[in-house]
Every structure is written in structure tokens, then in C-alpha cells.
Image (cartoon, helix red, strand yellow):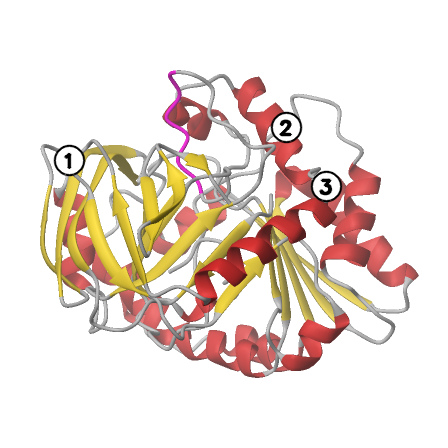
Amino acid sequence: MRRHLAVLVVITLFAIAAFPQPVDKEALAQRIVTQSAAVKEGDLVFINGSVRDLEILENIAVNVRKLGADPLVAIDSDRMTRRMFIDVPAKYDAQFPKWFALLANSADVVISIDTGDQAGLLSDIPPERFQARARASAALGEVMRARHVRQINLGNGMYPTAFLAQQFGMSQDELSNLFWRGVNVDYGALSATGERLRHALAAGRELQITNSNGTNLRLRVEGRPVMVSDGTLSTEAMARGEKTQVWLPAGEVFLVPVAGTAQGTIVVNRYYYQGKPVEALTLQVKDGRVTSMSAKSGLEPLRALYDSASSGKDLLDIVDFGINPNITRPPGSQVQTWTPAGTVTVGIGNNTWAGGDNNTPFGLALFLPGSSVTLDGKSLVENGAARF
């Protein structure tokens, strides 16, 4: 399932760490509350994050209340997350989460900060337990989407933690600088870029994605709605129910391709699952479905999770383009995330966050940095460099 927003229904495995560089936490809170979440008087606002981020969570709550809205803050920690599996019997995994159901049916806004501090924190937990908990709460995501709950995430899979910096092949300070540059992008310019790409994709018919690593994928996009994530929520878009999610750092344009049209090969040089690398992850796709999954090494834990997942896990049903010019990959790094300008990502499984109807609890994002993309033969991305 996509990584960012399902605070009420999934466990996230990324962390907030101590800020390695000065960050104006009060200004950040104000920006999230007023610009990204568009909080207004009378809103019920659920705020979730790590115990490490108590100050910024407090700042968000205070700024929510200053507008006459009502905040409710929930705190997570690695210790509690692990104990919820180690100490809680598996027989309760399928139990319907009543408290979260009340929140899903009541909250107007959900603001979340990525939590989790240890790579592989739950690597010894059987994959069936994750699936059981996800299935038990899957309906809550549908409720929130139907109610047009505004959902804001700070992290977007790249919050500057020590273990994520190690995976990306850079120092934590370098990742921190990259992250905050991305958060502080010019949102007006980002929106303009997003609209240009949206119009181009909406007028196109077929995408081809290629990479020197062996990736070669074709899929059709004609007639498909195209969405832009630019860090803000407009009153008009919210009224239409078109835009109720924000991921920070922002900067993505995404769509659900025409069902059954994806054909070809996807190769991810290095994929991380539970903090451990999967080398040369390779998927073969035919008629929109994954027909085989292989890797040079490290596939077994990921394969076990995939095998335990329910129907819909094999559908290739997301294409995502990064458009944030402030997020660049340092030479030699292995940054794998959604938003760098020129990045293309394809996804299998759950695509409800992208406007699709595949609500399987399983989802896999396959980042393809350095790829080239053409739309009806015209270049959109060349070797990872945006041409839009």
C-alpha cells in the first residue's frame, strides 16, 4: 500500500530523527496546518507521529487550535510498535479496530509524520500477520476517501533517519539537507510544472519506460485521469473531491493506466524490504499482471509477503512521475523515492491512493531512477532528466 497516508490502517517503517540542521518547527507547523491541510474552524484534526517529534506535534496541535479547530494527538514509538506484535496474540490481528473506525468516521483532517526508527524492526514477524491486520482495517481507508478526509503526510518515504541515509548511500546530514530543500520548494512553480505534465499525459496514448538495467515496459494511458501532488489543497479541488491528499516533500504527477495494457520487464537494481537489500529485483508483466518475480539475492522475505497477499496483488496499476527540482541524487547515491524531478515509479497492488479501485492490502512501489520515458514517441524523461 502506498507509503504515506494510511495512518489509521497501516504500520509505517520510516522515522523522524533529531533534526541535524536548524529547522523552524513553528513555521513548518503553520505551513502544514494552513497551506497543506487547509484547516478551518470547527474541523476535527487527528495528528500522529513519533515520540521523538513531540515538539513539532505540539506546534501542529496549537496551530490547529488557533484556527478554532479541535486537535487530537497520538504518539507512536518503535518499542510500542514491536510490542504490539510480540506481546499481542496473533488471534487479535483480524479484530476490527473500533477506535480507528470512530476516527475514520469523524475526522476532517489527518496529519501524520512518518514513524519508526529501526530498519528491520519487524523482520521476524510472519507476513500473514501484516496481511491480517491490513485486511481488518482496509475498509477504513475507503471510509476516509468517501468522506473526503484531508490527509497530510510529512516524510514521503525519505525522512532523514540514520538507517535510510545508509540505504541511500549518503550521510544523514546530506539526506536532511535534501529533504528540507524538497519540503521548502516553491509550491507555485511546482504546481505549474505539474499542470504541464498533467496536460501532456492526458492528451497521450502510450508510455514506454526503458532503462539500461533491462527495464522495458509499455502501457496505455489514454482517457485516464491524471493527478498532481503539489503540496497544497485548493478549496475548488477539495469541493470536487479530486484532491484530498498531500505528501511532503511534494512533487508528483500520477495516474492509473488502462487496465490490462502493461507489457514488458521491470528491473530494480536494489530494492529494500525490512531494511535488507533485494538485488536485481526483476518482474515480468503481461496483460497488466505480474507473471514472475525473481532476484539475484534477498528475495525470500519479500516473496513470502507477496505470496501471502490477496487478489489484486499482481496488477500493475500505478505510474508516478517526480517533479520536485529541489530533490536531486548526489553522485554515487542510491536515493529511491518518489519526488526527484525525472524519477519514474511504477506500482503493483493497492492503488486507491492514486484514484484506482484495487484495495488489496498489498502494494509495491518500484523506483526506476535514471530511466527514459516516451509518450507516443516523444521524450518526457531522458536518462533520468525531465524534459517536461
Q: Is residue 27 above or below residue 221?
A: above
Does residue 78 appear anywhere in the picture? Answer: yes
How many C-alpha atoms fall within 10 Å of the one at disc 2: few (<14), some, or many (≥20)?
few
Which residue does the numbered mark 1 point to in the structure image?
298
Disc on the earlier residue, 1 or 3: 3
In the rendered structure, find residue 350 and report the number of the disc placed on it: none
Which residue does the numbered mark 3 point to in the structure image?
186
Q: Residue at x 79, y 73 (%)?
A: 43
**Start-end of magenta stretch:** 332-337
Tell me where residue 277 sits by quadrant.
top left
Q: Residue at x 78, y 47 (%)?
A: 29
Disc on the earlier residue, 2 or 1: 2
Q: Is residue 16 above or below residue 304?
A: above
Q: Residue at x 39, y 36 (%)?
A: 336
Which residue does the numbered mark 2 point to in the structure image?
18
Separation of disc 3 and disc 2 at Cα?
25 Å
The three-letter code of the residue at mark 3 reads Asp
Residue 23 in percent (x, y) is at 75, 30
Q: Secondary structure at mark 1?
A: loop
The reply, left or right, for residue 113 in relation to residue 364 is: right
The reply, left or right, for residue 40 in relation to residue 319 is: right
Q: Secondary structure at mark 2?
A: loop
What secondary structure characterizes most of the magenta part?
Answer: loop
Judge whether residue 334 is colored magenta: yes
Q: Secondary structure at mark 3?
A: loop
Separation of disc 1 and disc 3 at Cα?
39 Å
